[in-house]
Amino acid sequence: MYRLLIIDDEIYTRQQIRNSINWELMNIEIVGEAHNGLNALELSDKLRPDIVIVDIKMPQMDGISFATEFSYRFPSSQLIFLSGYSDRNYMQNAIRLKAVDYIFKPFELSDLLSAIEKAIQRLNASSQNIKVPKEEDTALKLLLKSPAPDFQDYIKTLALPITFDSPFIVMLIRFNAGISFSRYESSNLMDSLELQNLTNNYYYAFQAEILQIFGDTVLMSKGGNSYVVFANIPSQQSDSSWEGKITSLLSVAPQLPITIGISHTYNTASSLNTAFREARQAAAGAFMTGYGNILFAASAPGRQFSTEHEARSSYHENLEKQNISEASAALDDYFTYLSNCNSRFIPDIREDLLQLSLQLNKKLKNPPFQLISEFISQASTLEDIRQYMQRLLSLYLAEVEARDNHSRIIFEAEKYIINHLGEPLSVKQIADHVYVSFTYLCFLYKKQTGRTLNQFILDMRMKKARSLLLDTNLKIGDIAAALGYTNQNYFTKTFVSYYGTTPSKFRNHGE
């Protein structure tokens, strides 16, 4: 019998699917249910379903994110999507993931039956025909087989170009399937069929380059929007040698947004799945760094993610006080912190940023964007979400200005300061920028904020210094220079006066 897994955060929908069809007559057994993508991934490893019915919109991990991960592990399993949102983006992702069907809630029984029949037809066809040439499918099959107790005996039956008792790595070459903010804003989204064609078209070009680097001891498969590569490290090459050569892969298709994740080196077959998970997790780091990079598991940031960060609190506080420029600066500092967190926290980071975006969106009388949660869950990178939230902040400022004619002058003055912290700053220079007199700007700023512009400059430099000390590895001298201090000793003296401790002690103790 075929094995069916049902994934939906609504218990009523799961019950409806379970009770509406005589599954035994269709030669199908419901082997499990899950209420979100994370829970479903855990179950999938144990249950190995042939067919999955999965909701698009769920907490913690949505259906598209689940399906992307699931398809790597079980490429022959069939996916059926459920959704109450008839959105083009979802349909494109369903196509990219080669879904059997896409059913809108509330669904008709005939639609569900039709989708199940299509899934069974695909399963029957795949059991009789191998659509992908054997040499292009073997890497994925090995990943599926590797947890089995007889894996060692299984690989002995295959004539593989790679040996797992010699040093090997797993590499994942991933095409960007996410949404950039610029495309989202203009509604000019990449067609998923276009992405699928690109990954097909460039397969042999990447394969040829990989063979040039590693020789013939390579196994490669295409899965979803990625290529999975197993490669023995040639004995005559040092680690630094092949690592240097591998940068050439970024030139195979320089116009395309790709990232390459690389595992640690292993030399036992039992480590294959571990190496694959490392490569996949490293490639996921493109969300933090942006695409166009090679990311090694050995160099992955180890920082834990927590919402208890000063920049996040400062953002909230200044947003509520309608100090938009300070809220904007704090938001940028928070994104700096997030970009240095380990990629395994990406689902938690996306969820946190979704909540922040929704809170900000509620403050707008005329919200400009629809489907916020869909964009946050599918955004290509942190930078795309940062641009999105900064755009919302600028729109919120425009609404605040409509109620207060002085807000634009204050905002422009503060924004100028924030953007020029690394340069010498004077109040006259700032006044000239906002086209008011020195005297009037000082009077207005003190009246509106209760502090002087020089105090604001000091506050912004010290807050930025704090962020750079805690969230980057920049040297203290470089931080001082980045904040406009030509003398590191003077910067240190100012920092001690402001925080009561030296920059080095502050960094070491995280105070």
Image (cartoon, rainbow, N blue to C red):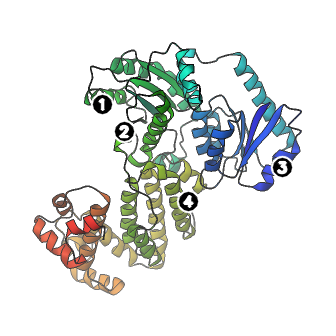
In the visual, does 409 lie left or right of 313? left
Q: Look at discs 1 and 4 and give the one toward the viewer.
A: 1
Mark 3 or mark 2, which is nearer the start of the sequence? 3
Mark 4 or mark 1, which is nearer the start of the sequence? 1
Per the rendering, the mark at residue 16 is 3
Q: Residue at x 47, y 48 (%)?
A: 182
Front-lying residue, 391 or 201: 201
Per the rendering, the mark at residue 452 is none
Residue 29, quarter of the rendered image: top right
Residue where numbered disc 4 is placed: 368
Image location (x, y in percent) of residue 98: 65, 31
Marks 4 and 3, how far apart in space? 36 Å
Q: Look at discs 4 and 3 and give the one toward the viewer.
A: 3
Marks 2 and 1, how far apart in space? 10 Å
Q: Amino acid at mark 3?
A: Gln
Assign a secondary structure to mark 4.
loop
Residue 257, quarter of the rendered image: top left
Q: Residue at x 37, y 50 (%)?
A: 301
Mark 1 or mark 2, which is nearer the start of the sequence? 1
Marks 2 and 3, how far apart in space? 45 Å
Q: Amino acid at mark 2?
A: Phe
